[in-house]
Image: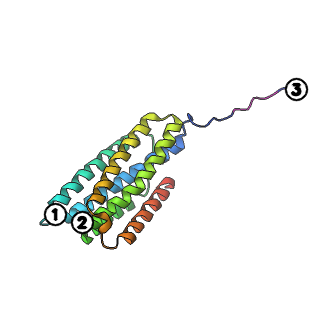
Amino acid sequence: MSFQRKTVRRPGRVRDEKRIEQMVRVDHAGEYGAVRIYRGQRAVFADRAGKSRIAGQLQRMEADEQHHLDAFDDHIRSGLARPTAMGPLWDAAGFALGAVTAIIGERAAHACTEAVENVIEGHYGRQVEELRLMGETGLADQFAQFQAEEVAHRDLAVDEGAQDALGYPILSAMITAGCHTAIAVTERV
């Protein structure tokens, strides 16, 4: 009688190429969408009298998002993932969301940031845990750094009165649902 040894996968330390590709694709799209949101908001506030303070805040946050996007562009170029086919939709939707929330007012623009960053904080957090279990510490550390910068954006938005925006509960819920939907779609497409 011969015994065949069965290979047992142990939790962690197993690189999941498909999952990493999915993470990079989703995060690339998300950072692209964030840049577009801030550009939409800045398009509304840029030349308005008395809006230089918020325009400056948005410009700084957009620069952080662009830095994140550049890193994900590098991952895409290196072959770690392919970009989402949803790019043109996320382009238009991000800019429109930014412009509309800015038209509503400064607090609504900040409510948008708060809602998006609340979703992204948890999203990056789950990815960091997953990557660490795979032994992908380099990506995990990068994602954790991006998560910390997203949290700083959220905290600024809260400090600037995001929760006092007109229709805040509905606005926040709609943006949160939109983010979750965009993540789910981009994971597949």
**Number of the label disc, if any, that sits on residue 106:** 2
| Mark 1 element type | loop
From the top left corner, tell me how far across and down residue 31 is, in percent.
Answer: 36, 51
From the top left corner, tell me how far across and down residue 66 is, in percent.
Answer: 29, 48
Q: In the image, what residue type sits under mark 3?
A: Met
Q: How many numbered tags mark residues here? A: 3
Question: In the rendered image of this protein, does residue 136 appear above or below residue 111?
Answer: above
- The answer to whether one can see residue 91 in this image is no
Task: Name the magenta segment's main secondary structure.
Answer: loop
Neighbours of disc 3 within 10 Å: few (<14), some (14-19), many (20+): few
Stretch in magenta: 3-7
Foreground of the two, 156 or 113: 156
Front label number (1 vs 3) = 1
Location of mark 3 (residue): 1
Instruction: Answer whether residue 4 is magenta in the image.
Output: yes
The residue lying at 21 percent from left, 66 percent from top is 44
Location of mark 1 (residue): 51
Foreground of the two, 125 or 102: 125
